[in-house]
């Protein structure tokens, strides 16, 4: 690990100002991706700016039919929150499937979304629910936020403050775990929202994406059999020693069916 300086920010505003003054600085919340990267000498920031304990980045509440979660809220807190379990049970379940207990207790919602790992779980929920990412500068719709592998709409110095999830009529998530890392080899989040059905896929491609052909098929009925004839092109999916592109396409279909089978009854 390279030498660097540690700074504990007193507010989001102060953190933003420090980033603007020190372009090589990096934010530190849970550090689940950043710390291993530093250990492997794949990053050389000048400073780590700790924002993990800022009150303005924490907390869970429901207001106006929407669930708001602070960016520094841990996976464990999302998974065990009575508020989340009541508003969007599928989101609480998803958070409980992330990594292991250490990762869930340290990792944060905002850090996961900002990093946009192609196999991360939270991006599927954010995109599947049509959430809004609120930053220190603006609000960004989920459909505009994710821009490919480890790429997002965030600009330099922009900090995720909270994420606002519209409460769906019903939703479910199913994930096929990578045997070693626990990351999603394919994870599918299905949500019946006020605007229609949304299906978000993580783990299978270079970034989270909506399976729009499945959405169109499911608009006629949220049944597993509805996607039997729906094609998911394998050409753009990931391939590696654990699964071919065709394997991942099949996994997506299987996980989608499992998510559909898990959907709660209509409210």
Image (spheres, rainbow, N blue to C red):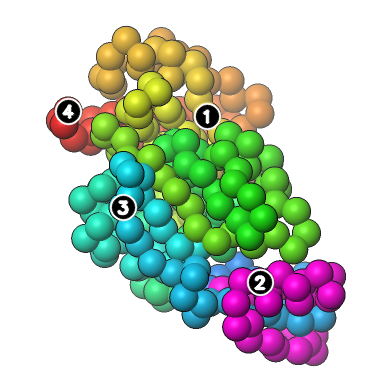
Q: Is residue 21 visible?
A: yes
Q: CA distance from mark 1 to mark 4?
A: 23 Å
Instruction: Identify the residue position indicated by label 1 in the image.
Output: 210
Q: Is residue 145 left or right of residue 1?
A: left
The region drawn magenta spans: 1-29
Tell me which label, 1 or 4, sits earlier in the chain: 1
Percent of width and height locating residue 137: 67, 55
Q: Residue at x 63, y 82 (%)?
A: 9
Instruction: Identify the residue position indicated by label 2 in the image.
Output: 13
Tell me the element at label 4: loop
The answer to whether mark 2 and mark 4 are in CB contact below 8 A is no
Question: Residue 65's image quarter?
Answer: top left
Q: Is residue 228 above or below residue 182?
A: above
Q: Quadrant of the C terminus?
A: top left
Tell me the element at label 3: strand
How crowded pointer 4 is (Cα within 10 Å; few <14, some 14-19, many 20+) is rated as: few
Q: Is residue 155 above or below residue 102?
A: above
Instruction: Identify the residue position indicated by label 3 in the image.
Output: 62
Q: Which mark is residue 266?
A: 4
Q: CA distance from mark 3 to mark 1?
A: 26 Å
Tell me which label, 2 or 1, sits earlier in the chain: 2
How crowded pointer 1 is (Cα within 10 Å; few <14, some 14-19, many 20+) is rated as: some
In the depicted view, which residue is nearer to us: 201 or 84? 84
């Amino acid at each position: 690990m390279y030498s660097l300086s540690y700074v504990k920010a007193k507010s989001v505003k102060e953190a933003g100002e420090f980033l603007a003054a020190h372009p090589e600085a990096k934010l530190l919340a849970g550090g689940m991706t950043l710390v291993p990267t530093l250990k492997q000498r794949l990053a050389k920031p000048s400073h780590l700016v700790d924002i993990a304990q800022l009150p303005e980045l924490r907390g869970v509440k429901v207001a106006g039919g929407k669930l708001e979660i602070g960016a520094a809220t841990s996976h464990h807190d999302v998974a065990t929150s009575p508020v989340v379990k009541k508003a969007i049970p599928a989101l609480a379940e998803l958070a409980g499937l992330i990594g292991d207990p250490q990762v869930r207790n340290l990792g944060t919602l905002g850090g996961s979304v900002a990093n946009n790992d192609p196999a991360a779980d939270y991006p599927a929920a954010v995109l599947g629910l049509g959430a809004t990412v609120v930053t220190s500068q603006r609000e960004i719709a989920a459909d505009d936020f994710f821009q490919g592998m480890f790429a997002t709409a965030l600009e330099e110095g922009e900090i995720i403050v909270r994420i606002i999830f519209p409460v769906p009529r019903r939703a479910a998530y199913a994930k096929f775990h990578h045997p070693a890392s626990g990351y999603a080899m394919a994870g599918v989040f299905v949500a019946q929202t006020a605007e229609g059905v949304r299906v978000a896929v993580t783990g299978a491609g270079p970034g989270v994406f909506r399976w729009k052909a499945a959405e169109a098929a499911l608009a006629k009925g949220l049944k597993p059999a509805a996607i039997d004839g729906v094609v998911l092109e394998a050409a753009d999916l990931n391939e590696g020693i654990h699964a071919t592109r065709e394997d991942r396409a099949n996994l997506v279909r299987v996980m989608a069916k499992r998510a559909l089978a898990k959907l709660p009854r209509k409210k």
